[in-house]
Image (spheres, rainbow, N blue to C red):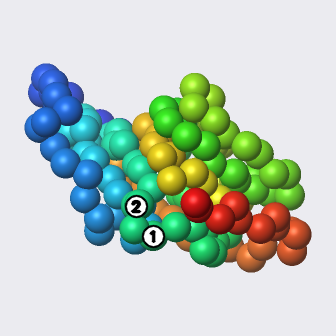
């Protein structure tokens, strides 16, 4: 992690300044960069993530963990269902989740309008696939 970067940049990103794009961590999500990784010298990334309307949930993210120091998810639209270790958790618009470093989780279901703000430190955090915390994962909700 770049803990000693000198942060001297001001950043102001308006809705039309950046677009949602594929090519992020998950193909079935679209990502909108908010310029924070650049502004903080790689100390923090902040991006909007939303469901790709052309790719409904089938298998979700799979079981994984993030190698990071800090991560929060703020659900801004719709909903998502996660498994955090062996506990199912429904996250709805307005909810805030602090994912403690290294927690085993699985986003397995989400609404077509799902969108969340994710803030992670460091910006170049890694994602590692892990064995399932439980074999019992509920089915996805079909999109209509």
Dividing the picture into quadrants, the one containing residue 7 is: top left
In the foreground, 3 or 20: 20
Q: Residues within 10 Å of mark 1 (few under 14, many from 20)?
A: few
Dividing the picture into quadrants, the one containing residue 108 is: bottom right
User: In this orientation, does residue 89 appear?
Assistant: yes
Label count reads 2
Question: Residue 51 at x, y = what percent?
Answer: 45, 56
For image coordinates 63% across by 48% down, the residue present is: 80
Q: Which mark is residue 55?
A: 1
Q: Quadrant of the C terminus?
A: bottom right
In the foreground, 58 or 38: 58
Q: Residues within 10 Å of mark 2 (few under 14, many from 20)?
A: many
For image coordinates 57% across by 32% down, the residue present is: 93
Q: Is residue 5 above or below residue 25?
A: above
Q: Is residue 87 above or below residue 64?
A: above
Q: Is residue 31 above or below residue 60?
A: above
For image coordinates 55% across by 40% down, the residue present is: 78
Q: Is 27 on the left-hand or right-hand side of 133?
A: left
Q: Is residue 110 above or below residue 72?
A: below
Report helix, strand or loop for mark 1: loop
For image coordinates 40% across by 68% down, the residue present is: 54
Dividing the picture into quadrants, the one containing residue 141 is: bottom right
Report helix, strand or loop for mark 2: loop
Mark 1 to mark 2: distance in Å?
A: 5 Å
Question: Residue 77 at x, y = what percent?
Answer: 50, 36
Q: Is 98 on the left-hand or right-hand side of 1?
A: right
User: In this orientation, does residue 129 appear?
Assistant: no
Question: Residue 13 at x, y = what percent?
Answer: 17, 30
Question: Residue 100 at x, y = what percent?
Answer: 65, 42
Q: Which residue is mark 2?
A: 52
């Amino acid at each position: 992690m770049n803990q000693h970067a000198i942060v001297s940049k001001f950043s102001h990103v308006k809705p039309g300044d950046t677009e949602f794009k594929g090519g992020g961590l998950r193909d079935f999500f679209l990502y909108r960069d908010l310029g924070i990784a650049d502004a903080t010298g790689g100390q923090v990334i902040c991006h909007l993530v939303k469901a790709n309307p052309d790719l409904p949930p089938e298998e979700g993210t799979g079981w994984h963990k993030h190698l990071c120091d800090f991560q929060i998810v703020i659900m801004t639209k719709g909903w998502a269902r996660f498994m955090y270790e062996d506990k199912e958790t429904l996250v709805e618009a307005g909810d805030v989740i602090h994912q403690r470093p290294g927690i085993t989780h699985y986003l397995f279901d989400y609404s077509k309008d799902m969108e969340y703000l994710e803030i992670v430190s460091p910006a170049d955090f890694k994602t590692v696939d892990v064995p399932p915390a439980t074999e019992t994962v509920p089915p996805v909700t079909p999109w209509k």
